[in-house]
Amino acid sequence: MKTADYLDQLLRKYSGTFDIYQPYVIHGKEYPAYGYFFSHIEKYVLVREANMWSADSYEHVLFIETPEVNRSVIDESYRLVKEYMEPVLVRKGAEVPAEGHMYSYLTIGLIAERPLSEEMKKAVKHFKFEKGYRFQVRGFSQAHIVCATMEDERVYTNYVGRKSAKMYKDNFRDVREGKPEICL
């Protein structure tokens, strides 16, 4: 299976709820795609002016295609989360996110041609970045990593990214069967 076919099908699935930008450039380096999701919920009494609370939730997904996952790809992923996604996409250069921020998930979607070595399986499993803002009053950011390998059709995640694994696994079947994804 080709990484481009897999990514195209995956982006169709994401596009139902995410805004997708293709390609996406960060500090002069081009990545195949970036996805953005936003949700706002609020609770009020009788009229909107009597707002009891509100919460904003975000997810940012950056896709990376690579022949193989090695230490430099893992380091680049961590650097992207720490030096770009969290300060620029979440805090927008400010000290803390905007009021009402509940959480931001920062997801790296690695799509690799070759299977992972045992060392890289451990690196993906132990990939971790979490940051709270003002003792969680302004929410938190959390990094998820999902790695799909084309040759053996396997999916690897860190602990907090495990909920995405099913969609990535199902995507192998959908590409093989040529199923078009219907976005609602």
Image: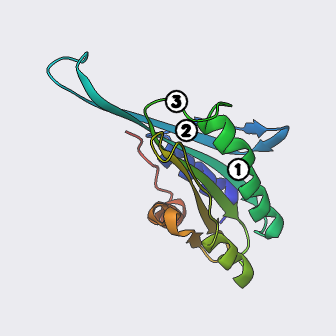
Three-letter amino acid code at the position of disc 2: Tyr
Question: Label 3's element?
Answer: loop
Three-letter amino acid code at the position of disc 3: Ala
Q: Establish if 152 lies above or below 18.
A: below
Three-letter amino acid code at the position of disc 1: Lys
Q: Quadrant of residue 48?
A: top left
Mark positioned earlier in the residue sequence (3 or 1): 1
Q: Position of residue 114 (x, y in %)?
A: 73, 73
Q: Establish if 54 lies above or below 131.
A: above
**In this rendering, would 174 be left or right of 147?**
left
Q: Quadrant of the N terminus?
A: bottom right
Taking the spot 74% from the left edge, 46% from the top edge, the residue there is 83
Q: CA distance from mark 3 to mark 2?
A: 17 Å
Taking the spot 30% from the left edge, 31% from the top edge, the residue there is 53
Question: Label 1's element?
Answer: helix
Q: CA distance from mark 2 to mark 1?
A: 17 Å
For disc 1, the marked residue is 82
Instruction: Give the total of numbered labels.
Output: 3
Neighbourhood count class around disc 3 (C-alpha, 10 Å): few under 14, some 14–19, many 20 upward: some
Q: Residue 36 — which label?
A: 2
Instruction: Name, please, the residue furthest toward the left.
Output: 46
**In this rendering, would 25 be left or right of 109?**
right
Question: Label 2's element?
Answer: strand
Q: Residue 98 — which label?
A: 3
Q: Position of residue 75 (x, y in %)?
A: 78, 62
